[in-house]
Amino acid sequence: MRKAVFCFLFTLSCLFIYAGDIANFVNLGFSSDGTKFAFGEHGLTDETYQAYANIYCIDVIDNSFLPSGYFKTSPTKETGGKESKNVFLSLLDRANYSLDKWNIKQKNEGRAIYVSTNSTVNENTLMFRDFETEDEYVVVIHKDKKSDMEAAFYITVEIIRPNGSKITKEIGQKGKFRTGIRDYSIKKIIIDNTNTSLIFVIEKHLYTKSGISIRYMAEAVKL
């Protein structure tokens, strides 16, 4: 009996620690020249089950948002009980004019050259090969914390070409601490169809009233 009670309490405590919600990531594609990229996320808030959606449009060369390139539907009573995918599609209708203007097409989604797994999600150093180009990558996410409620990161990448030449890049805002963020991890790395633009999809582990939730951001670099 005591063992059963202990197991119940342990399970309950784990649920409390890991309460929160995980957003769904959506690749909305590159422009044909790889200089622009867009992605979205959507989900339901934990406990209140209110749908939310965000769309981000990125200038790959500047690694910044395109002008008026952020679209948002916040979780409210009006989105409560709705399917988050439908809320996202409604938001996409609003964003489509801008996506068309920037020639961003979902069919130009590029290729994922790295996707995190359960065994690599907490790794800060990633070593892998792009089997299409035979380029070898060493990617390091450098993280810093002021507290459990404020964290920063930046990324360094070294690419070794088949001929032995190297490309070295530093991406992100070194020393920029974001309030409410507990941790970061690299979820996915995407390269465009011209093999000259890289997108690092970053998981943001953030505090909410109901626990740790996951949202996404992206860092971009032109090779």
Image (cartoon, rainbow, N blue to C red):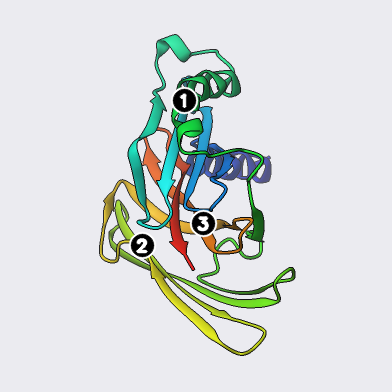
Residue found at x 28% / y 51%: 178
Is 56 in front, or is 205?
A: 56
**103 or 164: nearer the viewer:** 103
> Please, which residue is most extreme toward the right here?
131
Give yes or no for contact between labels 2 and 3 (Cβ–Cβ under 8 Å): no
Residue 200, x across and y down, in percent: 50, 58
Q: Amino acid at mark 3?
A: Ile
Pick the front one: 196 or 208:
196
User: In the image, is 65 to the left or to the right of 17?
Assistant: left
Q: Circle 3: is it few (<14), some (14-19), or many (20+) Cα within 10 Å?
A: many
Q: Is residue 1 visible?
A: yes
**Which residue is label 3 attached to?**
199
Cα gap from disc 2 to disc 3, whole angstroms:
11 Å
Q: Residue furthest bottom?
A: 164
Q: Residue at x 40, y 58 (%)?
A: 61
Q: Is residue 101 above or below residue 203?
A: above
Q: Secondary structure at mark 2?
A: loop
